[in-house]
Amino acid sequence: MWDYNEKVMEYFLHPVNAGEIENPDGIGEEGSLACGDALKLTFKLGKDGRIADAKFKTFGCASAIASASIMTEMVKGLTIEEAEKVTNKDIVDKLGGLPEQKMHCSVMGMEALQKAIANYHGSKGKQTKKIEGKIVCTCFGVTDKEIEKVVLENSLDTVEQVTNYCKAGGGCGSCRGEIEQIIEKVRGKKTKQPESLSHPKKLTNIQKIELIQHTINEQIRPLLKSHGGDVELVDVEGSKVIVAFRGMCSHCRTAEFTLKDVVEARLKEFVSTDIIVEEQNIG
Amino acid sequence: MSQIIYFDNNATTKVADEVVDAMLPFFKDLYGNPSSMHSFGGQVEKHIRHSRESLAALLGCDSSEIIFTSGGTESDNAAIKGVLAAYPEKKKIVTTRVEHPAVLATCRELQAAGFSLVELGVDKYGQINLDELAAEVDEHTAIVSIMYANNETGVIFPIDKIAEIVKSKGAIFHTDAVQAVGKIPLNLDKSNIDLLSLSGHKLHAPKGIGAMYIKKGTRILPFIIGGHQEKNRRAGTENVPAIAGLGKASQIAAKEIANENTKVKKLRDKLETAILKTCKDAMLNGDKINRLPNTTNISFEFIEGEAILLLLNQFGICASSGSACTSGSLEPSHVMRAMGVPFTAAHGSIRFSLSRYNTEAEVDFVAEKLPAIVNRLRELSPFVK
């Protein structure tokens, strides 16, 4: 049983500002059904340029609902510039604390807010899927920039803390080494240099295709399958590898990153550095 | 909290009043050690024997085939590791992806130590493919461990058929029957099950007591050593009060088992039908036909399990969830994922597990409160259209 404080329970049981604003000035969405929590934030500015109203919709646990609700309360009356400075730590402080493993709920609040502000600046009204930085955690689609931000703002020292705050590293765990390096970089410790890979000898075409298939089967598919997805090798043309996504991957928001950061990266590592991966065109 | 409606009996059960009464003398007066030479201690031995006979009657086996353990987890560990130790030439284990962690984590640890492990997948009903099982069990296989009934969904596996297949291939068959004992009739004398684990606290006995059935002639080495107890098969001074409690609970379970499959099943069905009818986007997980009479696992799409549980908790209603948030992990239950339950539903899965102590009034109360809870969270959800 989680040890939620009274304030968290109050905002969970009686959330304020639940709902969605029609014709908002800013709209931000964060998370997904697959990840287990998601937040949609909408806000409207008043004539004075301050946030006059903010509403949320949340799919998630008690702390996700409480974080979103209190955040909408916090940003009301702020200018865009002031709202931009709200961090996940501010949300946690306002709630009087969250269990360590639930910190990611407050980060989701902050990220939805930033997306809503970015959407306001873009002011086209259409949600953009632009993700800043390079995806580190492919399981939950967390970028290096996002990890750097939570490490810096919350003074995190361990991979476990990073997982609690932004979920990165909480799925298959294959990015934990990379997260460690980010922590070292941000917290000012010496970064370990990865050893350079030795160059493998030239392969025949048959050997190459076999090695590609083997790498996909042994290294890539188990990773995707643990998230309900899958990938199939369709064809190999020289150094161009054509694959097709199946299952959850075929409609996952991070699939394009999976293609580059998982499939291509693993094939470059285990087969050849000149490999380029493309997704099969449908129709 | 004043009123408690306990629908979480697959997690643990209320200790029956008769069971508590049966245990008390062994705390107060009969505290001797059954291994002692003096009759004050020695007289306790016959009570242990009596309990063993009661449990054997419930399982349909001989009392010499039962050893008492500290619970289901110990029995699972002891069965798997004990068989591997007895067959040093065989290095393969076969199990399923939906086992309780007591089996799954044990098998994976052994895999890391060099054993080969096959985890059979399940279909959307939570059932394994018997042909796949037959193909995987070979002459290198020491043990096959497959649960009798799944704790999350209540799905019952065709254990007699499975045991027959495993026997025909010459491997040892173990089943984790923690959820099945006391809920469905067993007749181990007539089955090909070699080893079976059970836990006291799932059948109205206390926590900290369990047992393992070891069919006569099964090769197995002891897991816990350092004493002659249980005929050298499980060392450690007997937990006499708890053994007395398990004996009493077994006697009651043998009498109540028909009740489980009529009264309790009827209550479960009433609850399930009401929920599926009144709650939007609710769907049943698992095998509707082959399952425990007391368990229902229902997914509420687009809302999250922990939030549902906390709102149920406001009314004193106890249930559990396969959502990621409740466990402190970030991913939903391994059972839901193995069954291919979509993420949209896995995070919102709720298990209600009943017992003979539940009443129709409780079922009606939960069925009345739940739709409002679901609607309230649906109103907050960005995914409900």
Image (cartoon, grey):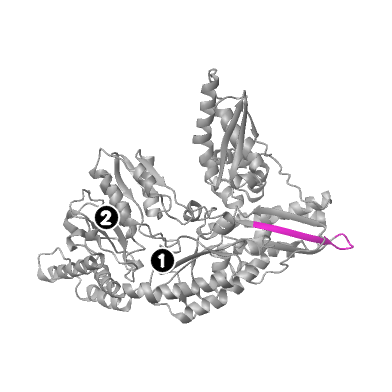
User: Alpha carbon of mark 2 to alpha carbon of mark 1: how far?
Assistant: 23 Å
Quick one: B310 or A204, which is closer to the camera? A204
What chain does badge 1 belong to?
B
Q: Are marks 2 and 1 in contact (CB under 8 Å)?
A: no
Which range is magenta? A38-49
Find residue B32 and report its horizontal and vertical position in percent. 17, 69
Q: Which residue is mark 1?
A: B10
Which residue is found at the position 77% from the left and 56% from the top? A27
Vertical placement of B80 versus A231: above or below?
A: below
Vertical placement of B355 versus B81: above or below?
A: below
Q: Is residue B191 visible?
A: yes
Q: Amino acid at mark 2?
A: Ile
Secondary structure at numbered mark 1: loop
Q: Quadrant of residue A15?
A: bottom right
Residue B193's mark?
Answer: 2
Quick one: A281 or A183, which is closer to the camera? A281
Does B309 sit left or right of A83 as displayed? left
Find residue B359 and report its horizontal and vertical position in percent. 43, 80
Quick one: A126 or B157, which is closer to the camera? B157
